[in-house]
Image (cartoon, grey):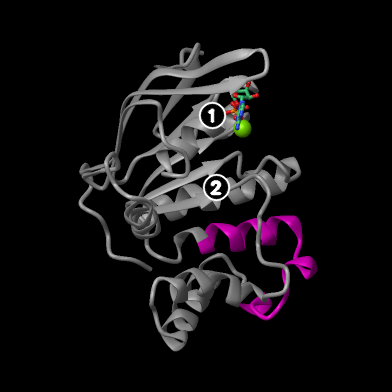
Amino acid sequence: MTANRNKGEVALDLQSVVRTYRQASGSLEVLRGASLTLRAGEIVALVGPSGAGKSTLLHVAGLLEKPDGGSVQVDGRPAENLDDGERTRLRRDTIGFVYQFHHLLPEFSAVENVMIPQMVAGVSRAAARTRARTLLDRVGLLPREGHRPARLSGGEQQRVAIMRALANDPRVLLADEPTGNLDHTTGDLVMGELVGLVRDTGLAALVATHNLELARRMDRIVELRDGLLVPYAA
Ligand code: ADP
Ligand code: MG
C-alpha cells in the first residue's frame, strides 16, 4: 500500500510542550511540559480522563495549534519558526488526522473524499483515484466507493475517514477517539483495522481512546496526568 518506513526512526518528537488557554475564569494550563517520542512502526495509545488535554496534545502534535512552550518535530523537521504556509505544507506532507466524527465532505462520494487531499497536494486526478481505490479496497469498501457519506454506516464512514488520513502517505497518524461514536463491536473492528494498517505501513500512530481494552492492543500506553505525559500504570 505504501513504502515501508525505516522502523525505529523518530517520526514525532514532542519536548516539554506547554499549552495554556485563556478563559474567563483565568488561564488554564492544559499541557505543562508534555514530552513524547514516537518512532516509525510504533502505535501508542493516549489515555486520560475527559478534559485532561488529549485533544489539545493531538492538535499541537498535528501542527493545528501552536504550543506556548516546548518544541514539536515531525519527521525530523522542527515546527517552530515556520510561517503559516510552511506549517501547512509540513502538516500536509507528514500528518494524517482522524477525528471522533468523520468530517467527510457530504457532497462527495467515498472515493472522492479520499482523492481530494491528494489532489490538493498536486496529485493528478487519475493517480489520486487509483490510490483512493486501493486504499478503500484495503478496508473492503471498494463496492461502496460511489456512495456519499450519508449512505454509509458509521463504521464505513470512519473507515473512509481513516483512508483519507492515509491518502497522502503521512509519517504520523493522529487519531482522536476514532471509535468513540461507534458501537462496541464496530469500534473494536475499526480499531483492529487501524492497528493493522499502522503495522503494515510502518507509520507512527498516536491514538486517543477511552477504551483500555483497545489501548492494550497497542505497543504502549501513555497517560496525560496533570498536564504531563506519563507511562500508564494500570
Ligand atoms: P480531552 O480531549 O482530554 O477531553 P481537551 O484537550 O479537549 O481534553 O481539553 C482540555 C482542557 O482545555 C479542557 O478543560 C477544555 O475545556 C480546555 N480547552 C480546550 N480547548 C480550549 C479552547 N480552545 N479554549 C479554551 N479552553 C479550551
Ligand atoms: Mg478530546
Residue 216 at least partly seen: no
Residue 225 image offset from top left, x and y in percent: 50, 13
* Nearer to the camera, 25 or 120: 25
Q: Does the magenta run of residues contain 145?
A: yes
Highlighted magenta segment, given as a residue range = 142-164
Picture residue at 68% right of the left edge, 60% below the top: 157
Q: Is residue 55 above or below residue 199?
A: above
Residue 196 at least partly seen: yes
Residue 40 image offset from top left, x and y in percent: 28, 45
Q: Is residue 128 above or below residue 218?
A: below
Q: Does the magenta run of residues contain 150?
A: yes
Picture residue at 57% right of the left edge, 21% below the top: 22
Q: Secondary structure at mark 1?
A: helix
Q: Which residue is mark 1?
A: 54
Q: Secondary structure at mark 2?
A: helix
* Comes first in the chain, label 2 or label 1: 1
Q: Tell whether 79 sits left or right of 218.
A: left
Classified by dominant secondary structure, the portion drawn in magenta counts as helix
Which residue is farthest bottom? Answer: 126
User: Disc 1 marks which amino acid?
Assistant: Lys
* Nearer to the camera, 228 or 32: 32
Checking the image for residue 192, the label placed there is: 2
Ligand 2 lies in which image quarter?
A: top right
Q: Is mark 1 within 8 Å of ligand 1?
A: yes
Q: Quadrant of residue 204?
A: top left
Residue 155 image offset from top left, x and y in percent: 69, 56
